[in-house]
Image (cartoon, rainbow, N blue to C red):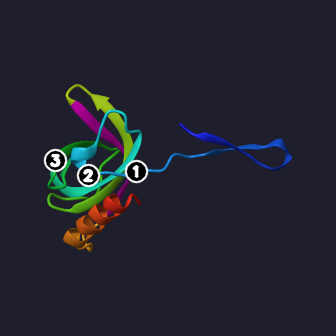
Amino acid sequence: MSDEVAGSGGFQAQRRLPYLDRRIDELTQDDIKVRVSGAVIEKRGDVLIIDDGTGQVRIATEGPKGFDINNLIRVFGRVIPVEGGVEISGEILQDMSDVNMDLYKRTHDIEKALGV
């Protein structure tokens, strides 16, 4: 999950894997760390369901979060394979209410096309 990088004095530093930007319909059980954005469509205790227009995914969180239905959020987390798909263990949840989601999605598509 991490690569060792030689440092000075024989110290071995470990690089962390990046969070890969994904649309919900792009998530696979082979993904490890991802970031996804979408609207909260359901809340149940420590679980949020978000929808980005391509699909829905369950986000498991630790403790209550201050997000309401229809809030736009970005989730950084680890993919957990489950029967019939995946869910995400949310590590960082970010309010995206002030982001123009149409522009955000177009930028995402351009970056994908360019391989960025």
Residue occupying the far front of the picture: 114
Q: Is residue 10 magenta?
A: no
Q: Is residue 66 above or below residue 102?
A: above
Residue for point 40% across, 50% down: 20
Is residue 50 at least partly visible in the picture?
yes
The three-letter amino acid code for the residue at tag 2 is: Arg
The magenta span reads 85-95
- Measure the C-alpha gap from mark 2 to mark 3: 8 Å
Q: Which type of secondary structure does the marked residue at label 3 adopt?
A: loop
Residue 108, picture quadrant: bottom left
Residue at the spot x=48%, y=50% of the render?
Answer: 18
User: CB of mark 1 within 8 Å of CB of mark 3?
Assistant: no
| Residue 25 location, quadrant | top left
Q: Tell me residue 38's x, y (percent).
A: 22, 57
* Pointers 2 and 3 in contact (C-beta within 8 Å): yes
Task: Give the secondary structure at mark 1.
Answer: strand
Quarter residue 104 falls in: bottom left
Crowding at mark 3 (Cα within 10 Å: few <14, some 14-19, many 20+): few
Residue occupying the point 61% across, 41% down? 3
User: Residue 81, image x and y in percent?
Assistant: 31, 30
Q: Which residue is mark 3?
A: 55
Q: Which residue has dot 1 on it?
A: 20
Give 39 or 2, whichever is nearer the viewer: 2
Element type at marker 2? loop
Q: Which of marks 3 and 1 precedes in the sequence? A: 1
Give the number of callouts. Answer: 3
Q: Main secondary structure of the magenta part?
A: strand
Is 91 displayed left or right of 97 in the figure?
right
Q: Amino acid at mark 3?
A: Gly
Asked whether residue 90 is drawn in magenta, I would say: yes
Residue 23, label in figure: 2
Which residue occupies the foreground of this view, 66 or 36?
36
